Image (cartoon, helix red, strand yellow):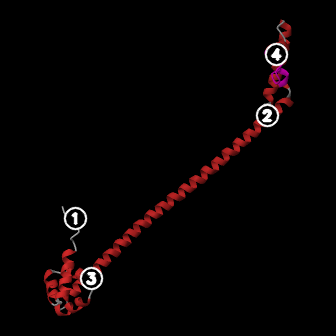
Amino acid sequence: MLIASALTRVAIQATAAIALETGAPSNDAIASEHGAGVPGNSVAACTAEEDIAPVLSALKAREERITKRETDIETRMQALSIAEQEIDRKLVALEEAEVKLRSTLAMANTAADDDVDRLTQVYASMKPKQASALFEEMDPEFSAGFLGRMRPDAAAAIMAGLTPATAYTISAMLAGRNANAPRQ
């Protein structure tokens, strides 16, 4: 900036010297033609270093503010990038946990079904008289679930040993199990 100011001063003085030699109008005459009466429009107003110093100071302050803003924006962008990476990492961890949970639930459901199947086989293997006594004491919905899983001949032998009221209740439950199933 100082070099530009020095070059401007040299150019103004050289122009004035050339104008004197050629008989051209002086800088003051040209300045008055182009509004030198307006404050800040005179050639002399731009040449003094004291007059340029506030402008330079303001420009430097503005540059510092802009640099600070750029730094702040860069810092925020880095923080956002780190946060985004952390979110992505946690999302992957959540997806992995979901897969593990689904696997565990599937295993638990399979284990529960296996337990019920095994217990159904135990009841079907029992002597019908003993199984009937046991089924007579069970909740009708519970016993209907086991009888519905058994082979028809084993279920029939157990049902034959039940009291008529219990056999009727279990039969009604077995018949109504799929009553609300959609039909095609």
Residue 120 part of the magenta-drawn span: no
Distance, label 2 to label 3, CA atoms, is 92 Å
Q: Earlier in the sequence, mark 3 or mark 1?
A: 3
Instruction: Give the amino acid at mark 3.
Output: Phe
Q: Residue at x 41, y 69 (%)?
A: 100
Marks 4 and 2: in contact by CB < 8 Å?
no
On residue 56, which mark appears? 2
Please report the bounds of the magenta region as a residue range: 34-45
- Which residue ends up furthest to the front in the rendered image? 165
Question: Which of the pair 40/92 is nearer the observer?
Answer: 40
Instruction: Give the amino acid at mark 4.
Output: Ala
Nearest-to-viewer mark from 4 and 1: 1
Distance, label 1 to label 2, CA atoms, is 84 Å
Distance, label 4 to label 1, CA atoms, is 98 Å
Distance, label 3 to label 1, CA atoms, is 24 Å
Q: Earlier in the sequence, mark 2 or mark 3?
A: 2
Residue pointed to by mark 4 = 31
Marks 1 and 4: in contact by CB < 8 Å?
no
- The answer to whether residue 73 is left or right of residue 183 is right
Query: How dense is the environment of label 2, judged by Cα within 10 Å: few (below 14), some, or many (20 and up)?
Result: some
Q: Is residue 118 something one can see in this rendering?
A: no
Residue pointed to by mark 3 = 142
Query: How dense is the environment of label 4, judged by Cα within 10 Å: few (below 14), some, or many (20 and up)?
Result: some
Q: Residue at x 50, y 62 (%)?
A: 90
Distance, label 4 to label 3, CA atoms, is 110 Å
Residue pointed to by mark 1 = 182
* Residue 60 figure quarter: top right
Q: Earlier in the sequence, mark 4 or mark 3?
A: 4
Q: Is residue 178 above or below residue 137?
A: above
Distance, label 2 to label 4, CA atoms, is 24 Å
Rendered-image quadrant of the N terminus: top right
Marks 1 and 3: in contact by CB < 8 Å?
no
